[in-house]
Amino acid sequence: MSRPRLKKFERAVVADPLKLQPRDIALLRDVGEFRFLNTEQIFALHPGGKRNLSRRLTALFQHGYLDRPQSQTSARLLSSHMVYALGRRGAELLSKDAEERERIYRRVREVERTLPLMAHSLMISQFRVCLTLAAKTHGVKITRWSQGYDLKEMLRHVHGENPSLVPDAFFTLEDKDDVINFFLEADRGTMTAERFVDKLKTYWAWRSDER
């Protein structure tokens, strides 16, 4: 008798515990750090047999370590690439205490709150995946990456008040003796040219203040 076909967004009842491997932990850390990753992005970060990795992703989902946000079905995403977020058991595994676990959950909730932001978040993830692979190839270190609530808190600490503008990300690259900071703006064609220029002016003012 053939096994019943599992629905993409429903977990089956699993009796046997999943024996986690070191590669599973690395995968969960990446999904937690990136907030959302689709299968294509995961394959790029974790090269190897795609079929085996796909099965492992399914197992991690079925056991609650990963989630498959159902909102991706109406967010105009490519249906061939399943989107994953960190699940409750995954957050519990990676967090050292309740405070860190809540911080991990907050990362996901802040993006999942509205549907259009999931596609935007995946755009940021795509940039970060490409940056990670390029940096590894050329021996450049990504020493800092901050986005979302974490970045807002960092800017509040620097400026002493709620920031009027929060970039999509802030990151630092180290290349030999050079240390370079970057702001990231990911636009899916929804921002006017005037608004984009205003943001650039704000970033330039911040840079000038730091000198």
Image (cartoon, rainbow, N blue to C red):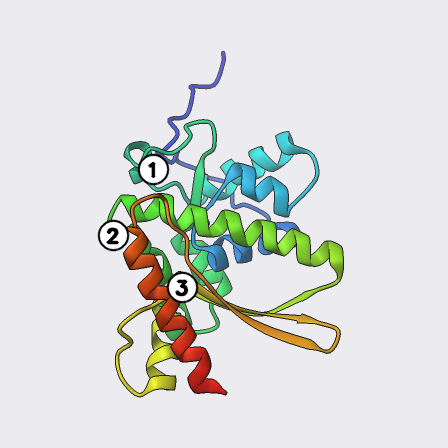
Which mark is drawn over residue 104?
3
Chain-order first, disc 1 or disc 3: 1
Residue type highlighted by circle 3: Ile
Give me the residue at 75% from left, 58% from top.
Answer: 138
| Residue sitting at x 71%, y 57% | 136
**Frontmost residue, 102 versus 149:** 149
Residue at image mark 1: 72
* Whole-number angstrom distance, CA of label 1 to CA of label 3: 20 Å
Label 1 sits on a secondary structure element that is helix
Judging by the rendered image, the residue that carries numbered circle 2 is 113
Residue 83 at x, y percent in the picture = 43, 40
User: Where in the figure is residue 85, as x and y percent of width and height?
Assistant: 42, 49
Gap in Å between the C-alphas at discs 1 and 2?
Answer: 12 Å
Q: Residues within 10 Å of mark 3 (few under 14, many from 20)?
A: many
Q: Amino acid at mark 2?
A: Arg
Which kind of residue does numbered mark 1 sit on? Gln
In primary-sequence order, the first of circles 3 and 2 is 3
In-front residue for pair 177/135: 177
**How far apart, in angstroms, are the residues tagged by discs 3 and 2?**
15 Å
